[in-house]
Amino acid sequence: MEKHFSRDIAFTCGRWPLDPKRSTLVFIHGAGESSLLWEAQVEGLKERANTVALDLPGHGCSGGSARQTVPDYAAVMVDFITAIAAPNPIPCGLSMGGAIAQQLLLDHAEHFRTGIIVSSGARLRVLPALFDMIAQDFPAYVEMVDRLGFSPKTAAAVKRPFLEDSLKAQPEVAHGDFEACDRFDAMGRLGAISVPVLVVSAEDDKLTPPKYADFLAERLAAGTRVHIPDAGHFVPIEKPFEVNAAIGRFLDAQGL
């Protein structure tokens, strides 16, 4: 796995330069997170496709300022994909990243032939108490992420690197990301996404329960549904082999 910068955007990739003959999986993390979320996919799928995971502006090792809306993050993604000249980009996002992937397929459809949505929904309302927790006691917020974001069957050693990384986030960035999530609503527009979309959910996800994925798969014109047991919201970390296999099968089905 290699680390690079495009302007002030930090990203990891399976191999560099990108192979122009391969599709490019572009992995997008969630609110207050970083590309660490997708390390198992960047490494595990690099023989199948170009794999790239970025830190959004103001997150992880990236410079710049975090954005305030999902459409603004989608615009960042288009600029990034163009800057690295990613061949046949496939947005793959989790939670807020899944919202960004939907926005890309809706408002920038000319760039994409397919997409992947993991642990997300067409609407991502946030409890007001979460904003207070982030502002007043950020470690308590990360403890809540541990408690609700992972399956009780997931070992502590598997969770630890992600939770330690989460504690390094700037509270104001996480707060702004959740505000962006709270404003996001694509429920009435999903039918406009005509390309094939893989929708991945997890059995023990308490943050975006499987019913969110049910709604997506039912409303998308060409949705493919995969449900993974014994995992929570952060299923790419908890069940990397299963997630990678699902993505590989989806790419095969699309001839990519």
Image (cartoon, grey):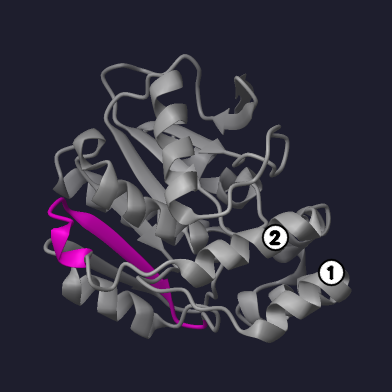
Mark 2 or mark 1: name the one nearer the start of the chain. 1
Residue 184 disc label: none
- The percent position of residue 13, horizontal first and vertical second, equals 53, 29
Lateral position of residue 17 relative to residue 222, left or right: right
**Mark 2 crowdedness (10 Å alpha carbons): few <14, some 14-19, many ≥20:** many
Q: Which region of the structure is painted magenta?
A: 190-204
Q: How many marks?
A: 2
Q: Residue 202: within the magenta?
A: yes
Q: CA distance from mark 2 to mark 1?
A: 10 Å
Q: Nearer the viewer, residue 241 or 53?
A: 53
Say which amino acid is labelled 1.
Answer: Phe
> Pointer 2 and pointer 1: residues touching (CB < 8 Å)?
yes
- The percent position of residue 96, horizontal first and vertical second, equals 50, 60
Q: Is residue 87 above or below residue 110?
A: above
- The percent position of residue 239, horizontal first and vertical second, equals 52, 63
Lateral position of residue 159 relative to residue 234, left or right: right
Residue at the image position 76 percent from the left and 62 percent from the top: 163
Q: Nearer the viewer, residue 14 or 7?
A: 7
Element class at badge 2: helix
Residue at the image position 24 percent from the left and 52 percent from the top: 250
Q: Nearer the viewer, residue 26 or 191?
A: 191
Q: Residue 197: within the magenta?
A: yes
Asked if residue 248 shows in the view, the reply is no
Residue receiving disc 1: 138
Say which amino acid is labelled 2.
Answer: Ala
Residue receiving disc 2: 174
* Quadrant (top left, top right, bottom left, bottom right) of the C terminus: top left
**Among the 4 quarters of the image, the one containing residue 134:** bottom right
- The percent position of residue 155, horizontal first and vertical second, equals 70, 72
**Among the 4 quarters of the image, the one containing residue 102:** bottom left
